[in-house]
Image: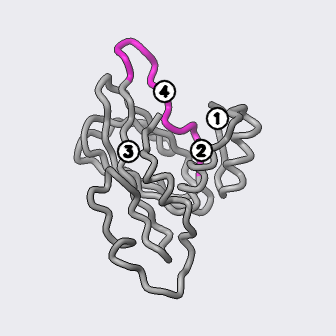
Amino acid sequence: MHKQNDKSSQQGDRDHSSSTSPPTLQDLLAAPLSARLLAPSGSDLIMAEWTAEGTPEGNEPMLIAPLHLHAEDDEAWYVIEGTLGFRIGDNSFEAGAGSAVAAPRGTPHTYWNPKPEEARYLIIMTAQIHSLIQAIHASSSRDAETIRALFERHGAVLLETP
């Protein structure tokens, strides 16, 4: 699982659709990013710094997100520290610190931390993807039917149940 802080969750509640007023400096700068989201008003782009717990030696890595695709949205990651494993389309690979990875819309993808050490990374997503993540975290039910419905409501398709 990834960790996000309370400020990230609170800031993500606002509407990221078109706005008539120009963005303020507070909307355009998140310093340090680890303490909040960068989610400018009127923008569909959201950036967050998250951490992924390590996988103990000998254990199967836990997926941070189940295999899914976004019909309308692209998603990207930048690994700051550690390693993340990815399956994007038919490709499975590991990306170390300094690596950037993208999942174009319509491409099945998932990711995980394959190493025992914690990983720090940036996730670059749309407001719709962020809304999906918030809905999953807010859901009291984690059964396959509920999660599948949440994905569908947010323009995504769950391909494997958690």
Task: In the rendered structure, find residue 160 and report the number of the disc placed on it.
Answer: 1
Q: Residues within 10 Å of mark 2 (few under 14, many from 20)?
A: many
The type of residue carrying mark 2 is His
3 or 2: mark nearer the eye? 3
Q: Nearer the viewer, residue 110 or 125?
A: 125
Q: CA distance from mark 3 to mark 4?
A: 16 Å
Sequence-first disc among 1 and 2: 2
Task: In the rendered structure, find residue 68 and report the number of the disc placed on it.
Answer: 2
In the image, residue 41 above or below residue 61: below
Name the residue: 32% across, 50% down.
Answer: 34
| SS type, badge 2 | strand
In the image, residue 53 above or below residue 50: above
| Quadrant of the frame with the C terminus | top right
The type of residue carrying mark 1 is Glu
Q: CA distance from mark 1 to mark 2?
A: 7 Å
Sequence-first disc among 3 and 2: 3
Sequence-first disc among 1 and 3: 3
Q: Residues within 10 Å of mark 1 (few under 14, many from 20)?
A: few
Q: CA distance from mark 1 to mark 3?
A: 23 Å
Drawn side of residue 124 relative to residue 153, left or right: left
Name the residue: 57% across, 74% down.
Answer: 17
> Which residue bears the numbered disc 4?
62
